[in-house]
Image (cartoon, rainbow, N blue to C red):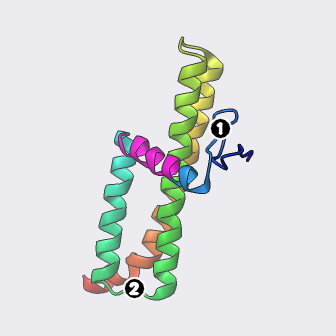
Amino acid sequence: MVKRADTSPVRHSGRAVSRLASFGHALRGLTVLLRQPNARIHVGVALVVVALAWALQVSVLEWCALALAMALVLGAEALNTAIELVVDMVQPEWHAMARDAKDVAAAGVLLCSLGAAIVGLCVFGPRLWALM
């Protein structure tokens, strides 16, 4: 980061001028993400998982596994959204490679979601089975 004589930060190449500004950009990115219908579904499922984990009093290690699984799915959804936005900007007309890029990004979310579902089954399955 280059500073002027008055010590105020200077912007270069559209990059953030400070760590605090970078954090603000990330928060704005979260709001962009949460406008996406699929991201809202993932957040809703995550809230159900948290409520169920709390009600069933899962262990600390199980909380860690659930938290990592939820973060992985939401992170994958964020990357998928970013890829879709960039592809739409660069290639607004239909193109096979643009379609493939978007489909592969969506497949990444699907794979993460399946992994998270397996974690959920491992954590909740025995407890729910015992309740039956």
Judged left or right of residue 27, residue 107 is: right
**In this figure, which residue is indicated by the disc labeled 1?**
11
Task: Name the residue type under label 1.
Answer: Arg
Segment colored magenta = 24-35
* Outermost right residue: 2
Magenta stretch holds residue 27: yes
Q: Type of residue at label 2?
A: Val
- Residue 124's disc number: none
Q: State which quadrant residue 131 falls in.
A: bottom left
Q: Secondary structure at mark 2?
A: loop
* Left or right: 3 as drawn, with respect to 20: right
Name which residue lies at 51% across and 78% down: 64
Answer whether residue 116 is magenta in the image.
no
Does residue 17 appear left or right of residue 64 in this picture? Answer: right
Q: Give the crowd class for mark 1: few <14, some 14-19, many >=20 residues within 10 Å.
A: few
Q: Which dot, 2 or 1, sits closer to the camera?
A: 1
In three-dimensional space, the C-alpha distance between marks 2 and 1, rounded to whole angstroms, equals 47 Å
The x and y percentages for residue 119 are 49, 70
Measured as percent of width and height from the top left, residue 36 is found at 38, 39
Quadrant containing the C terminus in the rendered view: bottom left
Q: Residue at x 35, y 83 (%)?
A: 127
* Vertical comparison of 54 with 36: above or below: below
Residue 33 seen from this side: yes
Q: Mark 2 — residue?
A: 58
